[in-house]
Amino acid sequence: QVQLVESGGGLVQPGGSLRLSCAASGFTFSSYPMSWYRQAPGKERELVARISSAGSTIDYADSVKGRFTISRDNNKNTVYLQMNSLKPEDTAVYYCNADRAPWGIRRYWGQGTQVTVSS
């Protein structure tokens, strides 16, 4: 059974930082790219960042380039998102997903972790 458990969210002031973690199980984590998505109230879920299976290729949404850093530890089956210089518009629920894996894996989503950026 595929499980994705996100953690690390919280309330932070503008300009602050948070580090999100996503612990994965139930599939061969090291074989697949992993992505972070976010969904703000009333908006569609959007891709934030993606990292290749070995970590050699990384892509970011334009809105987070230079502020967010995605990384992974294949020994711990965990993907991270370091978020710096946070802005109110970063407020959302953040999810991880193996969105390039076969449907039987990528159809699973975790509960997400809430990030709120507010003074």
Image (cartoon, rainbow, N blue to C red):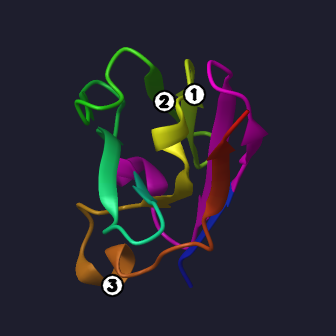
Q: Residue at x 31, y 22 (%)?
A: 65
Q: Residue at x 33, y 84 (%)?
A: 104
Q: Nearer the viewer, residue 77 or 117?
A: 117
The three-letter code of the residue at mark 1 reads Gln
The residue carrying pointer 1 sits among few (fewer than 14), some (14 to 19) or many (20 or more) residues within 10 Å by Cα, namely some
Q: Secondary structure at mark 1?
A: strand
Q: Are marks 1 and 2 in contact (CB under 8 Å)?
A: yes
Q: Nearer the viewer, residue 85 or 104?
A: 85
Q: Earlier in the sequence, mark 2 or mark 3?
A: 2
- Foreground label between 1 and 3: 1
Q: Secondary structure at mark 2?
A: strand
Q: Earlier in the sequence, mark 1 or mark 3?
A: 1
Residue 104's disc is 3
Q: Nearer the viewer, residue 11 or 37?
A: 11
**Residue extent of the magenta highlight:** 7-36
Q: Residue at x 62, y 73 (%)?
A: 111
Q: Is residue 32 left or right of residue 70?
A: left
The residue carrying pointer 3 sits among few (fewer than 14), some (14 to 19) or many (20 or more) residues within 10 Å by Cα, namely few
Q: Are marks 2 and 3 in contact (CB under 8 Å)?
A: no
Q: Using the rendered view, name the quadrant where residue 110 is placed.
A: bottom right
